[in-house]
Image (cartoon, rainbow, N blue to C red):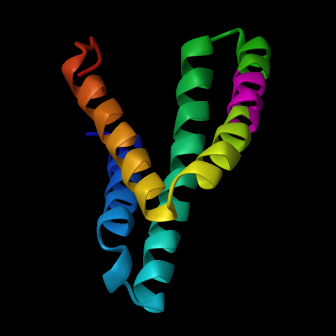
Amino acid sequence: MGVTTILTVGVSSTLLYLGLNQKNLSQITIFTCLVVWGLAVSGIFVGFQTWVLKLADKEVFPASAIYVSCFNLAIGLGAILGAWGVAQFPISQLYLYAGLIIAGSILLILLIPSNNR
């Protein structure tokens, strides 16, 4: 299992924990979960960029430009959807949804055959 997969599991677990235990959380627990989430997310971004650059081989600059464009598009769409979600649902429910979506993504990654495993 790669570092990116481990970090993704960390993000998913943290979000699910925050979503399911919202009423029983102390400030220290919330802070700890946010630190774990932040470290995992920052590692995922670096992992994805490294993966793209390795796959690009000699076309590193165009691949990097496409990656950055997609990354910025995802940030913009995430801000729009996030604002809508916060207006529609309680935060604990959003944590739960995000954790379930990420867990589903991990499951798909594990089920899809790969030549590199």
Q: Residue furthest front?
A: 88
Quadrant location, the N terminus = top left
Can you give x and y, in whole percent of width and height, for residue 68 in the image? 76, 28
Residue at (51% x, 44% y) in the render: 44
State the image quarter where residue 20 is shown.
Answer: bottom left
Can you give x and y, in whole percent of width and height, for residue 10 in the image? 36, 56
Q: Is residue 70 above or below residue 16?
A: above
Q: How many marks?
A: 0
Residue 92 left/right relative to 53: left
Q: Is residue 106 above or below residue 9?
A: above
State the image quarter where residue 117 is shown.
Answer: top left
- SS majority, magenta: helix
Does the stretch in magenta take in 81?
no
State the image quarter where residue 96 is shown.
Answer: bottom left
Q: Foreground: 94 or 77?
A: 94
Residue at (27% x, 14% y) in the render: 114
Residue at (27% x, 11% y) in the render: 115
Q: Is residue 5 above or below residue 92?
A: above
Can you give x and y, in whole percent of width and height, for residue 104 in the image? 30, 33
Q: Is residue 19 above or below residue 45?
A: below
Can you give x and y, in whole percent of width and height, for residue 36 in the image? 45, 68
Residue at (66% x, 44% y) in the render: 84
Q: Which residues are magenta?
A: 67-76
